[in-house]
Image (cartoon, rainbow, N blue to C red):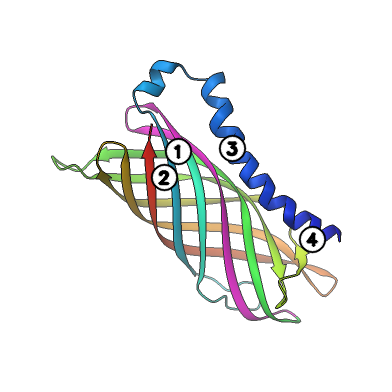
Amino acid sequence: MKIKHTKNLSVRQGYRFLVTLSTSVMFLIFSNQAMAQKNWSLSLRSGANFTTTKFGDSNLKTGYGFEGTIAYEFLPNLAIYTGWGWNKFNTNRLFTLSNIDIVETGYKAGLQITAPIGTSNLKYLLAGGGVYNHLEVENSEGKMTDDSGYGYGWEAEGGIVIPLGNSFSLTPTIRYHALTRDLKNGNLPTEVNLSYISMGLGLSYLF
C-alpha cells in the first residue's frame, strides 16, 4: 500500500508543481511590463527515447515520454526554464524480474538559448540543465515493485524553433539525458544508469 501511495503522489506532485510555479513566480518575481513583452513561454513536448547504455544487466526497448515546461527570458535570447516530465521503457528482463516497465518521473531546471538563424524566421535552440528524478519498476500488472528515490542527473539538447504566427511555435529537438540511481537486485541495491537520446517535438505558447 505504501508503494502504491508513493506512485500516486509522484504524479499529483508533478502537476501541482507546474501549476504552482506558473502562477506564483509571475507575481512574486517579475513585473506586468515583462509579461506584456511576451517573455514567458509554456511548452509541451513528447518524444521517443533510445538508450545508449545497458540498464543494469538488461537492454531497454525504445521508450517514450512527455513533459511540460515553463520558461522566462530574462535577457535577450537567454531564458531560464523548469518543468516536470514522465518517461517509460520496457524490458524483457532485469536482474531476477521479467517483462517489466521502467518509469522515470521528476523535475527539471536549466538555461536555454534561442537566436535567429540568419535572416529567416527560424531560430536555433540550445538548452542544458539538471534533473531531479526517480525510477519506478512496474510489473506486468502495472504494480510498482521498487522505487529508486529521487536523485540528480543532467540533460542537454538542441533544436530549431519554427514560428506559427505571433504566439505559437513548433520545436523539433534532439536531447541527451543521463540519470544514475540504485534499484534492488534481490535484496542488494545495485547501481543502474539510464542514459538515452530523445528525439521529440514540442509545441510552445508565448505570453
1 or 4: tag closer to the N-terminus: 4
Tell me, yes or no, whether the two marked residues, 3 and 1, touch with CB atoms within 8 Å.
no
Label 3 sits on a secondary structure element that is helix
What amino acid type is highlighted by mark number 1?
A: Leu
**Location of residue 112 in the rendering, given as x and y in whole percent from the top left corner:** 40, 40
The kind of residue on which mark 2 rests is Ala
Q: Earlier in the sequence, mark 3 or mark 2?
A: 3
Report if residue 198 is visible in the image.
yes
> Is 163 above or below relative to 7?
above
Q: CA distance from mark 2 to mark 4?
A: 34 Å
- Residue indicated by mark 3: 19
Q: Amino acid at mark 3?
A: Val
Question: CA–CA distance between discs 1 and 4?
Answer: 34 Å
Q: Earlier in the sequence, mark 2 or mark 4?
A: 4
How busy is the neighbourhood of tag 1: few (under 14 within 10 Å), some, or many (20 plus)? some
Q: Where does the image place residue 74, in percent across and percent down from the top left?
A: 41, 26
Residue 191 against residue 119 in the figure, above or below: below
Q: Which residue is mark 4?
A: 4
In front: label 3 or label 2: 3
Depth check: 149 or 38 in front?
38
